[in-house]
Amino acid sequence: MIEKYSVRTDLALEEKERFESDNVEIPGVELEESYDEEREIRITTVKIKTEKGAKIMGKPVGTYITLEAPDMAVADEGYHQEISDELMKFLKQLVKEEQDKDYSVLIVGLGNRQVTPDALGPYVVDNLNITRHIIKEYGKYAVGEQNVKLVSAIVPGVMGQTGMETVEIVKGVVKETKPDFVIAIDALAARSSKRLNRTIQIADTGIHPGSGVGNHRNAINEETLGIPVIAIGVPTVVDAATIVNDSMENLIAALETSETLRGVGVVMQGYNAAEKYELVKELISPHLNGMFVTPKDIDDTVRRISFTISEALNGLFT
């Protein structure tokens, strides 16, 4: 059943949780957790260390850091600054090999600016301090910071707009501008609706644009570009099957409290998570099976979170 259980998520944390719910140990995969009670920020690090673990998880070998903050969707500037600081701390760890030299970074804002849940990447680029052209022309003194790095950025759009794979565009830019590494920002899909717009994932493995919604594009990673790629993503959509599945879990819990319907709840509890999810997909197919849902306040939320991420990046490179 596990092999057939294909849940729509880009989060390594949720892939790990899926196997834990079925009491399955994954060889070569480590999980570390920490929780800041004062700021209500949970940090989970999933390390995939072996090819066997990567095959089971369906994700490349590497480190996946997940920052969960329930109030991230709230318009609180002070709280968002704390998230930016935390995000910057983890990004520093991933670029530690470059910190002692004047490195150059290319930031790629993935996604479609015309589709709000997919506009995270372009919005982040809008808020960045781009410095490469100034430093190249006038030197660091023109920027006013001695430790400032060469930052360039691109919003390559999507294949429907350009007729080209995103990786083809990025490879061309990398070849001409020769950055030391790439940071790619993209909107993700989540398994759990509670993580929508409340979670940031950082990975040192690059990214597969569109994979969470079943629209697989060529990978943007060190193998395809020839330089390290760090991916930053925020889940902004969840598929319809997940919402129905979560509702069914709540229904089962309610049935267990009813004297007359308790037997139905017991029967449903006999199914494991994979079987419940597959049952839901069958029930809603074909009309809702390919539907993805996003919160109604996604316009404000994506702009706010994009600014939070851009602040972390601006702080990292100055």
Image: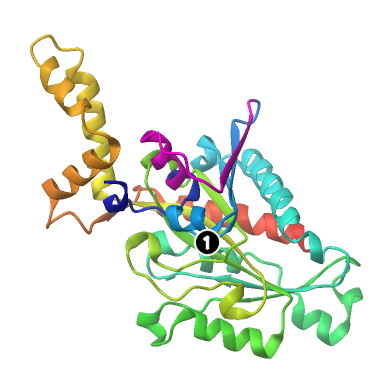
Q: Say what secondary structure mark 1 lies in.
A: loop
How far across and how far down the image is residue 55, in percent?
45, 58
**Type of amino acid under label 1:** Pro
Question: Which quarter of the figure has residue 309?
Answer: bottom right
Is 183 displayed left or right of 273 in the figure? right
Residue at x 53% of width, y 76% of height: 155
Quick one: 192 or 18, which is closer to the camera? 18
How far across and how far down the image is residue 179, in percent?
72, 79
Looking at the rendering, the stretch of residues picked out in magenta corresponds to: 15-37
In this view, the residue farthest toward the top is 259
In magenta segment, residue 224: no
Residue 318 seen in render: no
Question: Which quarter of the figure has residue 128?
Answer: bottom right
The relative height of residue 245 versus residue 138 in the rendered view (above or below) is above
Is 19 displayed left or right of 72 in the figure? left
Quick one: 28 or 131, which is closer to the camera? 28
Residue 193 seen in render: yes
Question: Which quarter of the figure has residue 34?
Answer: top right
Residue at x 70% of width, y 55% of height: 91
The relative height of residue 10 versus residue 16 in the rendered view (above or below) is below
For label 1, count other residues whose C-alpha is less than 10 Å away and answer few (under 14), some (14-19) or many (20+): some
Quick one: 274 or 43, which is closer to the camera? 274
How far across and how far down the image is residue 30, in percent?
58, 43
Residue at x 17% of width, y 28% of height: 268
Q: Which residue is mark 1?
A: 60
In magenta segment, residue 31: yes
Is 202 displayed left or right of 193 in the figure? right
In this view, the residue farthest toward the left is 260
